[in-house]
Every structure is written in C-alpha cells, then in structure tokens.
Image (tube, coloured by chain):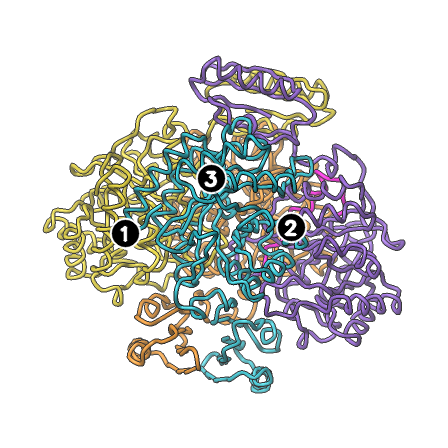
Chain colours: A yellow, B orange, C cyan, D purple
Amino acid sequence: MIVEMRTGATPEEIDAVVQKAKSLGLDVQLNVGTNKTVVAVLGSSTGQLATDILAVLPGVENVTRIMKPYKLASREFKGEDSLVSVDGIQIGGRRVVVMAGPCAVENEEQIMKAARIVKEAGGCILRGGAFKPRTSPFSFQGLEKAGLELLARASDKWGLPVITELVDPHDVGMVSKYADLLQIGSRNMQNFALLSAVGRSRYPVVLKRGFSCTVTEWLTAADYILAGGNNRVILCERGIRTFEDSTRFSLDISSIPVIKRYSHLPVIVDPSHAAGHYSLVPAIAKAAVAAGADGLLIEVHPNPKEALVDGLQSLTPSDFARLMEELKAIANSVGRYI
Amino acid sequence: MIVEMRTGATPEEIDAVVQKAKSLGLDVQLNVGTNKTVVAVLGSSTGQLATDILAVLPGVENVTRIMKPYKLASREFKGEDSLVSVDGIQIGGRRVVVMAGPCAVENEEQIMKAARIVKEAGGCILRGGAFKPRTSPFSFQGLEKAGLELLARASDKWGLPVITELVDPHDVGMVSKYADLLQIGSRNMQNFALLSAVGRSRYPVVLKRGFSCTVTEWLTAADYILAGGNNRVILCERGIRTFEDSTRFSLDISSIPVIKRYSHLPVIVDPSHAAGHYSLVPAIAKAAVAAGADGLLIEVHPNPKEALVDGLQSLTPSDFARLMEELKAIANSVGRYI
Amino acid sequence: MIVEMRTGATPEEIDAVVQKAKSLGLDVQLNVGTNKTVVAVLGSSTGQLATDILAVLPGVENVTRIMKPYKLASREFKGEDSLVSVDGIQIGGRRVVVMAGPCAVENEEQIMKAARIVKEAGGCILRGGAFKPRTSPFSFQGLEKAGLELLARASDKWGLPVITELVDPHDVGMVSKYADLLQIGSRNMQNFALLSAVGRSRYPVVLKRGFSCTVTEWLTAADYILAGGNNRVILCERGIRTFEDSTRFSLDISSIPVIKRYSHLPVIVDPSHAAGHYSLVPAIAKAAVAAGADGLLIEVHPNPKEALVDGLQSLTPSDFARLMEELKAIANSVGRYI
Amino acid sequence: MIVEMRTGATPEEIDAVVQKAKSLGLDVQLNVGTNKTVVAVLGSSTGQLATDILAVLPGVENVTRIMKPYKLASREFKGEDSLVSVDGIQIGGRRVVVMAGPCAVENEEQIMKAARIVKEAGGCILRGGAFKPRTSPFSFQGLEKAGLELLARASDKWGLPVITELVDPHDVGMVSKYADLLQIGSRNMQNFALLSAVGRSRYPVVLKRGFSCTVTEWLTAADYILAGGNNRVILCERGIRTFEDSTRFSLDISSIPVIKRYSHLPVIVDPSHAAGHYSLVPAIAKAAVAAGADGLLIEVHPNPKEALVDGLQSLTPSDFARLMEELKAIANSVGRYI
C-alpha cells in the first residue's frame, strides 16, 4: 500500500504511519519528496488489509492499494488455467461449452421439449430455474422443489447434466441432489452467507457477476467459495448496469480478456440477460466466443410467446439451431470447437 | 401498457396483441396512426404484469409500462405518510431521528462508550453491526451472536433502542430478540428470501437501497416486505454506484423528494457509507436534513483510528457532537427538530 | 406520446392536455380507465416534440415518448443499409474495413513507418491525430497543421486514404484538404456547432459515440449531420463510461446489433480507446467483427514505448500483423472478408 | 507515480523503468519486496505526466498516479478560497448568490417579466440562454444574437448582471459585449478549444460539470482556463448521468465538500437540470445550500406551461418566491445569507 501524506504533514504524523504499519508486521520504506512524503508499505498480506487502517491517521491524504484484494482466484496464486469438470464435460478447455434451456421450469412438457432442442442442436448442459428471484413479489416465483424434480427427469431422459439457481444457503444439500452445477445469480454475488455455504460443499458452481460489481469484486467474491476449499468455480459475465437503455444490461465484453489476464478461473457468458431481446442474442453470443469465452448460457424456450418468465429474451428452437451453427464456425476460427 | 407495433405490422399481428391482452382480462384500445399502430392495454393490474408477455409477439416494436411495478409502497395505494414507531420513537413525523454508532461491535468497552456518545449528543437509536457482510473473506466478519449480546447490554444501560443488520433469513427470530430495528443491507436489497422472511415478521425494518438499484426497484423490494403483512418499513438512501471515484458512492440526494412524491414510506439517509471519508460526512448529513430526510444513520466511533471496520468514515465523538448542533439548526430551518 | 394523468385528475385538466395537443396539430385518443386516464397523442412529428410541453400541464403524472427522437438516421426513414464510399473503399458492405495508425502524428519518420505497417498487414485506411483534445492543458496537444501535412505525405506514399480528427467548426475546409475522412471525437459528439459545420460539407464523417451518451442520443446527433444534407455518416463505438475500472471504458458490444436494428448507418468499433491496454485489444477487436461491425479503428505505433500519446493501448507492428490474420479468420466465419 | 512490476519481472525490466524515469528528470526509489518490486517515481511534475509512458514498458503490471493531474485549480496550489467578483457581487464569500431566469430567452415580454420576478424575490443575477445546444436538430435552437440583445435590455432595466451560455470559441468577444458572466455548458466541459478561448479572455466563467466527468476531470478542465491566465472561474455542479431514471440526472451533492477540500474555486449548483421536474427542485436547492454551495442557478419562467424549452423543470414565479424564503432560512442556519 502507498500512503501519501498531506503537504505539510509533521514528522510525528509520518512516524505514526510507520509505527502502525510495523505493528501489523509490515515493511516500510519512506520516500521524502520536496512536496510530499510518501510511505510505501510492503508485505505479502497488504492486499487483504483495509486501506482505512492507515487512511484514518492524521496527516494522511490518501492510501492506494497496489496488491489486488483477491488472492485465491488470482493468476499470481495459480499460474495455469483451471479446468472444471461436470459429469465428464470440461469447462475451461478447448471446447466451448453451451448450456441452454428456459429461464424457468414451467411444466414437464416444456422442460422435456427444451431438453430435446438443446440436445439436438449440440448443447451439452441443460439450464432451467426452479427458484426465481423476481423483482416484484407479484411475479411468478418458480416451481421450487417440483421444478427440480422435472429438471432431473429431463436430465435423465436426454443425458444432459443440469444447471440451476440456488438462493438459500440452507438449500445446498437439497438442490445438489437434483442438479450437477449450482448457479449463484447476479443479485446474490455478494450474498456472503450463500457463497460460504457453497464453498463448504464440493459441487461445481457458476458465479454470475453482480450487475454492478467490478471484476475485482467479482474475483474477491470467488475467493469466498475458494476459501472454503471448493475450487470448482466458473465465472459468468451477464451484463452490467449502465446508463444505456436500449438493452437490459450492457454486456462487458472486455471482462473476458481481463479475467483471462488476472485469474485462472474459466469464464462463460450469458448473452440473454444482457440483451433482454432475442434479436440481439446471436450477435452477443458470437462476440463472446470470439473474445475467448469458455462457454455460453443461453435462454431457449419451445415457445417463447407462452413463456412465464423472460420470453422476450428467449430464442425459438429454430433460431437456437441456426445460432449453434454460426457459433461452431466462430469457435473454429479461434482454434476451438463446440 | 402501451404496445407500439412495427411500421408495416399486419392486421393479424395487431389482432394477436389484442387477443392476448383480452385473454389476460385487460381492456384494449387501438390507435391506428398513419405510420404506426399503437395498442393501449388498460387495467389496474398492468403494473404487475411483465411487458415481455406482449413484447415477444410478432410485429411488436416496443412495450412501455405506464403503471409503476410497485403497488403497496406507492402513494396511490396509501395517500398519507406512514409513521413507524420504534420503542416510542416515531420515524416519519416532525422529529428527525438520528441513529448512530460504530460500523461493527468490537468489544464491550467500545460499544458502551459509543452508546454514551450517541446519547449525550442527542442521538436516539444506537447502531452497531454484529454480522458484517465484507467484500473479502479475509476481512473481519463481526462478533455475530456475542456482538448482539453486547449491543443489548449497551441498549439497556443507555436507554437507546438498537438497530442491527440481518443477513440470513433463518436468523429473524434470533436477531430480533436483541434488536429493536432490523436492517437489510445494500447488498441484500434484492435478497428476496430475506425480504420475505422479514415480511412474515412484525418487526420494524430499515431497507437500505441497493447501490445500483433504481428507486422503482427499491420500492418494489419494499413490496416484498409489505406483501407479507409487515408495514413497518423505513427506507434508507446510502449512495449509488457511479463513475465518480472521489467518494465511495454517490449519495442520490434527489431520491428523498422522489420517494416523498411516489411513496408513503419514511426515508432516512446514511451519509457515512456514501462519503467513505469522515471529512465529507457533515456536509452530506446537513444536505439530507434540508432535503427532507426523516432521519440519519451515522457512523461514530470512540476512536476511529483503532476501528476494525470503516474507521475512515467514522466521526470522532467531538465531530459528532458538533455535527448534532449544526443539524439541529438545519432541522429548525425546515420546520422540524432533532 | 402517451400522457398518463394523475389519479384524480379533473376533466378540465384532461381537456387542457387534449386542447394543447390539438393546437400542435396532433391527433388525440382518450383512454379513460378505472384508475387512470391516459391520453394517446398521435402524429408523425411526435418524436421530435419535447415531452415537457405536455408534462408541465396540471394533473399530468408522466409523459412517455413512443416515436424515437431521431428521424433521418432511423431504419424507418431508410430501410436499406447505407454504404459510405471513401476513395473507392466501401464502408458498410461485405468488407470489414480496418483503419489503423498511431494516436497522434509525431514526426515524419513515425507516420511513414506506421503507414507502411498498416499497408503491409492489410489495413486500408490510415489514422493519425493532428489536433489532440487532451484532458490536461499540460499534455501534448498535437502537431496541428504540420501534422496534417505529414499525414497527407504518408497517404500519398502508401496509397492509403487518411482519417483524422476535427475539433473546431471553422476548420472543416482546412482539414479536408488533407484528410479523406473526418473524425468527430467522443467529447464532441454533442458539440452541435461542429456537427452542423460538418453537415454543411459533403465529406465523409466518422461520428464517435460520446462516452456517456445513449445509442438514441448518438443517432440523434447523427441527425444533425444528416439534416445538413451530408449523408456520408459512419458511426464508431468506442466504449462507454461505467463503474468498471479494469478497462479505460466499457466497450458496448451490444450497440452493434442495436444500431443494425434501428439505423441504416454503418458502424465501426475502436477497441483501443475502450481497452486502454494493448493486451486487451485483440479480444475486443475479434468480438467486434463477430458481432457484425463494418470496420475497426485500431491504434498501432512503430514503437509504443516511445509514443507521445496513448502508447499503452497501441499495438506493436508484429502484434498488429498477427491480429490482422486472426481477424481475417473471424470475418470469414461470419461471411465477410478483410 | 507508483510502478508495480509483474511478479517475476527481470532486473533488466526493472532497470529500464528506472532509466526511463531518470531520463524524464524524476527521482526514483526502489522497493524490492518478496513477491513484487515496486518503483516509486517522485517529482513535482508527476501529476501532469501520462502514466502510459511507464505502463507500456515490459514487465510493468500497473502504474498508479499519486499526485492529482490538475494543478492550478488545486488547493495545494492556492490555499485560500478564491472569490470571483461580477459587477460588485462576490461569489465564494458569505453570501449565497442566486442566479435565476428562464432556460431560453424567448421574447422581450418573457425575459422582462422573468427579470422582474428574479429581482423581486431577491435573486441577484439573471440567467437566460440565447444559444441553445439541443439534443435534436429539430428542436428550438435559441434566438442567438437577438436573444443577447433582449437579455442586455432586461439587465439594464432591472439592474441585474447577466449570465448566458457560449458555444463557439469564436464568439467570446461578441457574447461578452452583452453578458457579464459566460457559461460553459455540460456538453462542452471538455471542448478544449472553447476552454482555451475563454482562458485567453478575462471574463468570469461558470464551468458546468460534464454530466459524466469526474471531479478530477472537471478540475483539470478548469486548469485549461486558469492556464490561459483567467482566474475568474466558478464551478457548477448540475447532476451526473447514472442508471437512476426518476430524475433527469443525479445531483452529486458530495461534489460540494469534495471541491471545497481539493480546490480553492467557488462552486454553485444547478438543481433544475438535475431534477428535470419542478416539484423536485426545492428539495435539491435546499440541500445544496446546506452542503455549502456558494450559489444556485435556478430556472424560473413567467409561465412554464408556455416555455419553449425545459418548461417542466422551471419554477413558477410564486414557487420561486416561496423557495427563496426557505433558502434564506437554510442559509442562515449554516452561517450565510442570501
């Protein structure tokens, strides 16, 4: 950490900063400039230290963190790419893994049809929500346990592993009986009780980015899961909130190379929630693969016009099949396959 | 809802929209313009209906919601201001209620000293966190139950009701044994499991604004609590995330008159988390009272230099006492008192 | 426009809205609901009308615009894609046009080397700034007219048309003596004096998106140029300002399909200013081509370590050559070529 | 500047950073940690140096600026508050200066009535736009020179100095014949040609904050004017663009204490453009005065219902008179007067 003293800071104030840093077991180096004194505080744990501890001292103008606050998710901690295996499917390798299905499980016929569409078009994991965190209490909240059972049945029939969202820390055991891959939604990215619960398990987890969290906060949230001993973490970019209103969220395409630079974890992309409209999904999905995403999480519905949730952003079966063909071409052009 | 058809939409496409709306029990009025056909869909429940249901139909360009999505929190639902009473203290009336204390309960001496400072300067509710949702798993996470016990002791000794944060839906009963006012933090504003749990209780709740949620989403989150039958809801503005980096968050001062216009619920302001630096807290606190806030939630610590959490944004005892005097003058100038 | 009256609005208030709309030559349709009266105001010019004119009337709750505020840039105004031709190179067709070069023209050797690099790797337009709008007055401001002369010399020698930025409305004539394509920078997207000046000319223009302007405002700014009679307008997405700080700006990849949906104008992408770091440029550039961009504007410098401006986001000659090969593969995979 | 080397950076890479810094005339101090080497680059001009110059070197992970990029606007450059005098009225002193009037000058009757309203309610400067930068080319663009003449006439008759917006760098001389105070609008905050032109003059200037610029960028833009030798600069906060959509912009109330901390320049607030709706203006105006603003810029119109521009955010004469009384009480409560 770099502590910038105020112009005119007294020697006593500077000394207090030095003593405080030493009391925390850190090394200190003093840079006495003509205008400013700057104190460099060094040590391997400074990334995890709150800057406040020094910023609050008298005579301090500003404290800047140099080490990143996340640790276990960083590429400095682990140099090679992590691979997460789900039922024999590797995420983070040469294959671009397509997970697809409806936003919410609605009934047996719907989820069975959806699974067939996904399978036939070449998708390899089935998505479907049973617990739906909805903005309004008056909206459809999901089939809950009955939905999980339907998902499991579709999974068996079509030989597709299943990903579904978890919302309550007390449900890890129950949900993972039915699902192969647990999803933590955007609104729960900083639900630390939920992250810790999942970290204590050994199930693979897709951690969606909070729609207004930075990449740094996202990787620090991943640290909660990794710190529990569960290293089967997959990140999922799904758009951030900006002033732009022609899409539901702004997909942060740059987050893919940023993650690849700073972290060893695989990263996938959900183009559907970012777009908010089916007509925009293909372009975003193709961009994600070109940018290096390890997978996609796409909403497809047997009949979007009748969908109970998010029909507008769901692809029809034929649009999905066409997109899969286009994605295969893009994947090949960047040395991967679907 | 207003459904704008694409230029060149066919009569069949327009008719499908009309039929869909009617099937949902809604009234429809057709506006056939020279360039565009616009379908107005009317009915008292359109605010709670997803726009997707119509937007997904062929030939539809765009669907605009006219009714607000929240209902129980709206001033249209309840015209007069709601008052929430906590241990005889009314929030939402002429008195501007100051809640103050440290970010985290650290030990008995600290919380006892803090309670004394709050009491002596004229504050009327004691704040202090026992469960701390922290960005990094390596940061101090709070004293948990032991912290609640210390809070309750300070409350008894100094005759101050207590507000504290709740993070797990299963803890409502336990936490409310010790606390008079439950706080739902910014990162949990859309933790619907938590909102529902609190809604099933009858304890007063402070619902902090999600740092990147709109006022509309905030009031819709309040609907989750109100829908459970708990109408003791207080809103708390605490800053939103923007591109500005000289403060931790940007306090949205306009949200106060916006809430007063659209909702009957009381609204308080937390200037400390928005500012992120003690030197900025007084100006923001004074602005909040001038803008019509019903209360303040301020961080004060017996010795900010030794604080375990957020010391940089905590006021010292003397700064807090001085601010209280300034706030009294402002409150008087807008016809209220502290 | 849709005018939502307040609950309890009087018949006189409703009538005042109707009369006002009629006085503006518009058609009106009344929707009297049980809770709300809604007035639909119809006519082909409502997109260009300020909503304030009705919103300010007593009893009005809210006014929503249905027609987009831009007109000439819209796909409704012109159904087929516009092609802009620069010295025989068509922008907006099957070819993905790569424009590249240094951020600023520094001296003859630098711009000559840069032109050669661009030409040899397959780029077809040379970029280089002579007037540099810099955040600080103490930064290098560009070579101005001398820079334009060097650019023109490089253009002649290597047979590459030239794009350069224009900052003063009085310089249109002078700059276009040297340049083939005028660039309006992000900070000037709403410099209406500059837009109008360019609109009165017949030179092709690249209009960069304001870094915090919506797509709608961007297309409305394009209307300023089109309204002057100059229809040679190319849009350029270059990243928007968000809370994310790991990149300089967040490239809004979704803006490409959004523009294609709502406008007939070609759209190119500048991955360099969004990324802010050379290591992130290739992934973003590839994503842009996959998403359907009609061209790219890339910073490349013979020796980024010695660049006077924005060296960190400039590609080296070898990185640029490698990227061009990768881009050709992506372009082919989406049915285009470079 | 603090240069963080990558883990595993070679001694040659570290040395290259040291040599580069020394070649720029800067001091260097090396901090060789166990994991990381950090190079502190010291000198009084580092604030004005681009970080790219070092960040682009091999082996560099990140470069952090410690000194602020602005210089002349900083409190470190000038410790005491600056006062700007306009026709005998001091801005930045104990008096809170209220500037008010219509958004646009429409005709003689309107501006004369407006001046009277402002004068009688206790305002001391008349505002009114003659050049209107409008989002759409089809909107009313202002009366231009004829508007300036009407403004000057109202100024003479009512003894009120006049503030008006300038949009073209070539118009400084012409506009300042009629106006006492030049306004640079939000969209032109980084129109460096305009800033430089005004900097070469000696007229007092109100520099509005760009709606998506940081405080740091705003003060750096002020440096453009100050660097020309014109030190009569007043800052004006008018709201920033965020995701919140219940107001037109989000007024950044914290910017007032932030400016007071880091700069010596006076700062005023425009509550009207931020609010976008007259009903929200009073609360924001009161908050601004409580937070320490040196003045206000308020839109008032003799008849908002007939206003050509921004009628929705204009106060009526009676609302303005009432607000002035309320503001006087607030000003007194913070030791100032109106």
Residue lying farthest left? A157
Q: Nearer the viewer, residue A285 or C336?
A: C336
Residue A147 is marked as none
Residue B15: x and y in percent read: 30, 80
Circle nearer the viewer, 3 or 1: 3
| Residue at image point 59% right, 70% down | D138
Q: Which residue is mark 2?
A: C174
Along the horizontal axis of the image, is D335 left or right of B195?
right
Q: Amino acid at mark 3?
A: Ala
Q: Decide which of D199, D215 is in the foreground and name it.
A: D199
Q: Which residues are magenta?
A: D248-266
Badge 2 amino acid? Met
> What chain letter is assigned to the residue under label 1?
A
Q: Nearer the viewer, mark 3 or mark 2?
A: 2
Callout 2 environment at 10 Å: few (<14), some (14 to 19), or many (20+)?
few
User: Does residue B238 belong to the magenta stretch?
Assistant: no
Depicted A184 relative to depicted B147: above or below: below
- In the rendering, which numbered label is found on residue C275? 3
Going 48% across and 14% down the picture, which residue do you hit? D12
Which chain is home to disc 3? C
- Left or right of A304, for residue D54: right
Q: Which residue is mark 1?
A: A298
Answer whether labels 1 and 2 touch (C-beta < 8 Å).
no
Answer few, some or many: residues within 10 Å of disc 1's Cα (few below 14, many 20 plus, some between 14 and 19). Answer: many
| Residue A158 x/y as whole percent | 11, 50
| Mark closest to the chain's N terminus, 3 or 2 | 2
Inter-mark Cα distance, 3 to 1? 26 Å
Callout 1 amino acid? Ile
Q: Residue furthest front?
A: C157
Q: Is residue D256 magenta?
A: yes
Q: Residues within 10 Å of mark 3 (few under 14, many from 20)?
A: many
